[in-house]
Image: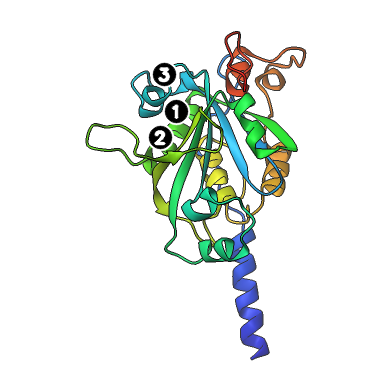
Amino acid sequence: MAATLTLIAVGIFAYLYAPMPGPNVPQPSASDCVELHIYSNGYHSDIGAPASIFPEDHPLRRLYPDAESFLIGWGDQAFYLSDGTDLMIGLDALIPPSASVFHIAYNAGPSSVYLSPNDDTGIAVSHEGARRFVAFIDRFLVLGSAGNPIRTSDGKVVGRSSFLRSRGSFHLLQVCNQWMARALRAAGVNVNARAAWLAGPLIRQVRKVHPTSCAVVSGNNSHPSPERREATGQGPIATTL
């Protein structure tokens, strides 16, 4: 019995922490850089992305045509729609199948207030990485017959956010932060998605393995890039709460 338990423990540890090849995605450079922005309250994470990395006719840009950036989150539908205090809803979410939803808000910086974030980190990616990030989002985004997102309800940011129908089941091995880590891997960020259950450790991974701004990539830390300003909603026409 002890040997069996040991074998199971070793198998779980290997699944979570065995080295994986890094993403085969071009890395950012001084002339090829887009900045995403991850917000966290230690438990949940959302990611800010410039609207400009999405095609002009993209469903999210049609949903919020005046957006400079989008704040994107993903999670269990029932728990996301709750106030987050019901333990039973949280435990039930870990048992598949559990329906998932996107939470989309426009102008990421101001909208991130709903999270009460205690951390925000820039993530520099190449334009190809940004394209693959959008493709990752598209794989999960469910569209209606007219090609528009299927809005399930108002979001948590009053007047500027929506819950949208998503593909994929939320469960113990695909919680919100693991999904976020996989989105980052799609963009070229070499993080361990399997063990990314909490947002805090995920952000520490990002800071350890990846440049956190286009300014760092270019060797100039004095001013945020224009695309960083878009990702955080700090552009010249940013909407405030």
| Figure colour scheme | rainbow
Whether 44 is drawn above or below 158: the answer is below
Instruction: Give the CA separation, mark 1 to mark 3.
Output: 19 Å
Q: Which residue is rendered at x = 63% and y = 36% of the image?
A: 114
Q: Would you identify the image quadrant in which residue 215 lies? A: top right
Three-letter code for the amino acid on which mark 2 is drawn: Ala
**Mark sitting on residue 131:** 1
Q: Is residue 190 visible?
A: no
**Mark sitting on residue 238:** none
Instruction: Give the CA separation, mark 2 to mark 3.
Output: 19 Å
- Residue 98 percent location from the top left of the image: 44, 60
> Which residue is tagged 2?
135
- First in sequence, mark 1 or 3: give its number: 3
Which element is circle 1 on? Answer: helix
Instruction: Give the CA separation, mark 2 to mark 1.
Output: 6 Å
Whether 228 is drawn above or below 18: the answer is above
In the current view of this chain or complex, which residue is farthest to the right?
222
Q: Is residue 81 visible?
A: yes
Three-letter code for the amino acid on which mark 3 is drawn: Pro
- First in sequence, mark 2 or 3: give its number: 3
In the current view of this chain or complex, which residue is farthest to the top?
236
Label 2–label 1 contact, CB within 8 A: yes
Which element is circle 3 on? Answer: loop
Nearest the eye: 140 or 6: 140
> Which residue is tagged 3?
65
Whether 2 is drawn above or below 112: the answer is below
Nearest the eye: 219 or 202: 202
- Residue 22 percent location from the top left of the image: 57, 43
Label 1–label 3 contact, CB within 8 A: no
Few, some or many residues within 10 Å of mark 2 (<14, 14–19, 20+): some
Three-letter code for the amino acid on which mark 1 is drawn: Arg
